[in-house]
Image (cartoon, rainbow, N blue to C red):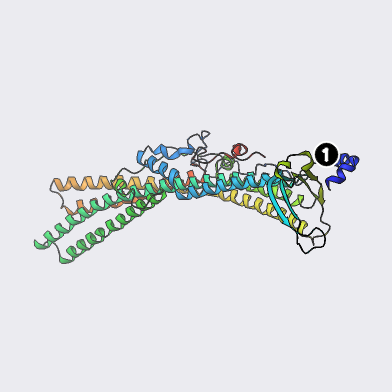
Amino acid sequence: MHASLLRTQPRLRQALLASLLTVLAGCTTVGPDYQTQAPDVPAHWIEADAAPPDGDHDDLRTWWRAFQDPLLDRLVDQALAHNQELDIALARLRQARAERVQIAAAAMPEVSIGVAGEAVRGSKALGSQPGGQARTWYPGFDASWEPDLFGGTRRAVEAADAGIQALAEDRRALQVSLVAEVVSDYAGLRTAQQRLLIAQDNIRTLVEAERLAEQAQHSGLGTLADVTQARAEREIAEAQPPLLDADIAHFSHAIGVLAGGFSGDWHAVLATPAPALPMPADLPLSLPSDVIRQRPDLRADERRLAAATAQIGVAEAQRFPSFRIPLGLGTSASVIHDLFSGASLAWSAAMQGSQSLYDGGRTQAGVTAAQANTDAVRRLYERDLRAALRDVEDALSAWTGERQRQAALQKAVADSQQALQQASQLYTRGLSAYLPVLVAQRSLNQARDTLVLSQLAQRRGEIALYKALGAGGADNAPGVADHRNAAETTATR
């Protein structure tokens, strides 16, 4: 609508303003409002008797510190501060926050300013005003605003906020996996070092057995077959340390990369053997309903469900009319010093509206697609919830079974020690040869090695349980804001 028409028809101008205010007053937000619902979960774990629930979960965020290993604490802190996967996730989070600002800007007026100058010289061959010249200067600005009458932009911002929160939870889920992997590799490294010491003890025992077999053969009390058998056992035992050295190097390399560096960065520090991680006294088992609150991957699924629900409103808003209010204001004059005079002022205002009458079903299909996507995301959430509860059950079952197995292995080690002691006493009294002592020593080494492997399996079962419970996703991790404060960490709606 041109400015001249508005000047000559004040009643029309008043009617236009009244209509605009009426329309703005009737702004609504289409689409369903998301409602958080607590899904149904079992009341207790199957293995609840093996590890009763613990109501105090304050230490879950830094559960690895319960091992009281300063080097492990350093490794985990280094990984949380410098791991590349976490840095990538943080960059994605910053990108999503910037995109949210772009989406929210659609509800704000857009203002631009421009300056133009023009010089015109007419043709001298014209019969009227031949060779006329003119200069014109045009400074001014343009503004336009598209009111969010039906909440399409508000729903888009709502979806963007939920998406940001989901990405923050994804990063916490990465933290959970990262911490569990670092602790598991560290436990594997210390166990491999412990097994290497046992293997070296076993080699020394077999070397002595081979020497005794050779001595018996020379004295006529043994055979060449005995010597060959003893040599073969010693050679088999000597093949074990290279494998354990490779395991130690593998774990050391993995820890170096997880900590954000290169594979050899921590090799010198980790090369010194240290005691294996102690066994836990109790497990921090929570109730099934607590897992939904604790696991960041489930919280991310729930936030994606909220975002998908908001996208239904974005699609619904496309079915309603859109309005746009352009405004232009500026001056024009042939000489610069007249640009700011009242006579040079020029302005225009209008209100534009449009509504699609037929689009071949495209808009309705968009709504249907958004609804179907929401249903799919809801099913994914339910699937992941069941998988998370299964992870806890599996970890708890493995931990319980290994604990029972370990009790039998501890008895085997105790019996082997007693057998070695008895054989040593008989040999000391001259009532037996030395070979039974070596056999008892070899049996003890084998029992010790099997027990160490069982202890590692139980530690890894504990680590798997911590991971399944969502432990290690610290809210105060660098660069990650809690989604409850997302409105404060992103642009204002």
Q: Nearer the viewer, residue 166 or 142?
A: 142
Circle 1: residue type: Leu
Residue for badge 1: 21
Observer-nearest residue: 332 or 53?
A: 332
* Foreground pick, 127 / 194: 127
Q: Nearer the viewer, residue 365 or 92?
A: 92
| Rendered image quadrant of residue 481 | top right
For the point 22% across and 63% down, the residue is 232
- Residue 120 visible? The answer is yes
Q: Which residue of the protein is positioned furthest toward the bottom in this rendering?
A: 224
Q: Residue furthest left?
A: 219
Residue 125: percent from left, percent from top:
77, 64
Q: Where residue 58 sits in the image (x, y, percent)? A: 50, 34
Taking the spot 18% from the left edge, 54% from the top edge, the residue there is 435
**Circle 1 — which element?**
helix
| Residue 404 makes an appearance in the image | no
Name the residue at 87% across, 39% down.
14
In-image side of 112 versus 402 (left or right): right
> Around disc 1, counting alpha carbons within 10 Å, would you say few (fewer than 14), some (14 to 19), or many (20 or more)?
few
